[in-house]
Image (tube, rainbow, N blue to C red):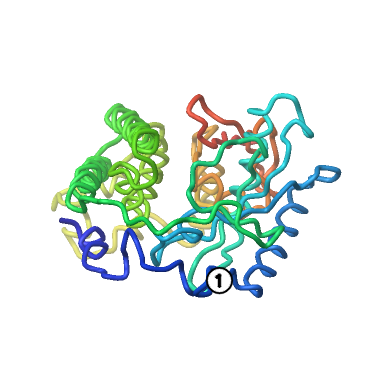
């Protein structure tokens, strides 16, 4: 069993159900900490202002998820949902959701707010969207909408970790194969990664639909998320795409590095990096410009005309140039000479095509 998964198993702090609500935030009679509430409301004000939702009514601000229930652990976020009527923005509610998801994701990426050891995660939600959680608290009105009842579920922990371990093993195999792959093989691994991500998503949805948040599938998903296996998978999907189109050429010296006849350094002890290159000659070599982001640097200094990024590599690149993710928009990246066309693919992944101007 891998180290992260073993650590997660051994750590007694990580439990699926507790005897009380998280006492970092809740009193013994289930009243929410007023100081924490005020901080979350202040964060929400800044979050909404960043989204530029002028004239849109805020119907409620709610706290949901594990920290409003008995199934919290040390990894649980403070999930704050801002409820609005999507139709106040546009009749196409799916379009509104997609347009809000990008800035929301960038906000959470840029602002690492942590209260008493738990990260704050902001969400936008339509006021009419049904909510399946058994614990739901209104921060706006300072009262329970749905107070959770203490009802410990029957959980087969071995089944949970068995399912999580099987998926984690698949991710580790893909990572190992990708380290040796390029071209067509990288393309196959890219497709395998996307299929596995889709499999995990469908697994969780089936579990939630059948048995709710304590289903084996949903708990296995949480194990994978908390051990960063899902983050590794998303990074793998992005890096495999880069490998499909990245060309790797050996230099003359790399090719003959182990040949005592062709490698002058092995033959006479001279440094191969100095052969035929005087200081005068070195000054005539093309300048390799350094940029804030390695992807931009590779594009500017390499032979490729465009690079596609998705997920965290894309958002890190945008953050480096203070650009918000907005599907359907093309923005320049500072004075790098590169622009990014932002869009969502058919699976809803956040994507960007980097091109030289």
Q: Residue at x 62, y 71 (%)?
A: 36
Q: Quadrant of residue 108?
A: bottom right
Query: In the depicted view, which residue is nearer to us: 131 or 206?
Result: 131
The answer to whether one can see residue 292 in this image is no
Query: In the depicted view, which residue is nearer to us: 339 or 56?
Result: 56
As helix, strand or loop, the secondary structure at mark 1 comes to strand
Query: In the depicted view, which residue is nearer to us: 92 or 353?
Result: 92
Q: How far across and how far down the image is residue 222, in percent?
A: 36, 51
Residue that sits furthest to the right in the current view: 55
Q: Quadrant of the N terminus?
A: bottom left
Q: Residue at x 14, y 49 (%)?
A: 259
Q: Quadrant of residue 98?
A: top right
* Residue tagged 1: 115
Classify residue 51 as left or right of residue 311.
Answer: right
Q: Is residue 328 above or below residue 163?
A: above
Q: Is residue 129 above or below residue 54?
A: above
Q: How far across and how far down the image is residue 244, in percent?
A: 37, 32
Classify residue 321 as left or right of residue 119.
Answer: right
Q: How far across and how far down the image is residue 137, in percent?
A: 59, 56
Task: Tell me how many marks there are.
Answer: 1
Q: Quadrant of the C terminus?
A: top right
Q: How far across and how far down the image is residue 241, in percent?
A: 40, 35
Q: Quadrant of residue 341?
A: top right
Q: Residue at x 25, y 51 (%)?
A: 155
């Amino acid at each position: 069993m891998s180290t992260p998964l073993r650590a997660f198993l051994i750590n007694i702090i990580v439990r699926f159900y507790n005897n009380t609500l998280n006492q970092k935030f809740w009193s013994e009679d289930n009243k929410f900490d007023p100081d924490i509430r005020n901080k979350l409301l202040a964060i929400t004000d800044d979050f909404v202002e960043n989204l530029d939702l002028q004239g849109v009514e805020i119907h409620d601000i709610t706290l949901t998820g594990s920290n409003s229930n008995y199934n919290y652990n040390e990894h649980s976020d403070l999930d704050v949902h801002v409820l609005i009527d999507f139709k106040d923005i546009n009749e196409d509610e799916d379009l509104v959701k997609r347009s809000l998801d990008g800035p929301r994701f960038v906000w959470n990426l840029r602002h690492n707010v942590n209260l008493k050891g738990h990260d704050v995660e902001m969400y936008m939600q339509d006021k009419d969207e049904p909510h399946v959680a058994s614990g739901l608290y209104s921060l706006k009105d300072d009262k329970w909408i749905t107070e959770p009842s203490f009802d410990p579920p029957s959980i087969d922990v071995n089944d949970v970790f068995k399912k999580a371990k099987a998926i984690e093993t698949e991710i580790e195999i893909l990572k190992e194969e990708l380290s040796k792959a390029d071209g067509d093989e990288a393309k196959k691994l890219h497709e395998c990664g996307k299929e596995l991500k889709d499999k995990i998503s469908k697994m969780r949805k089936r579990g939630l639909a059948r048995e709710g948040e304590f289903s084996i599938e949903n708990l296995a998903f949480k194990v994978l998320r908390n051990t960063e296996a899902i983050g590794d998978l998303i990074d793998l999907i992005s890096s495999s795409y880069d490998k499909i189109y990245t060309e790797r050429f050996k230099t003359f010296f790399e090719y003959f590095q182990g040949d005592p006849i062709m490698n002058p350094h092995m033959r006479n002890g001279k440094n191969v990096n100095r052969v035929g290159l005087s200081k005068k000659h070195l000054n005539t070599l093309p300048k390799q410009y350094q940029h804030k982001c390695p992807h931009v640097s590779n594009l500017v200094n390499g032979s490729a005309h465009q690079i596609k990024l998705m997920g965290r590599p894309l958002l890190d690149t945008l953050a480096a140039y203070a650009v918000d993710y907005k599907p359907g928009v093309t923005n320049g990246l500072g004075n790098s000479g590169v622009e990014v066309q932002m869009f969502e693919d058919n699976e809803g992944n956040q994507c960007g095509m980097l091109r030289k101007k």
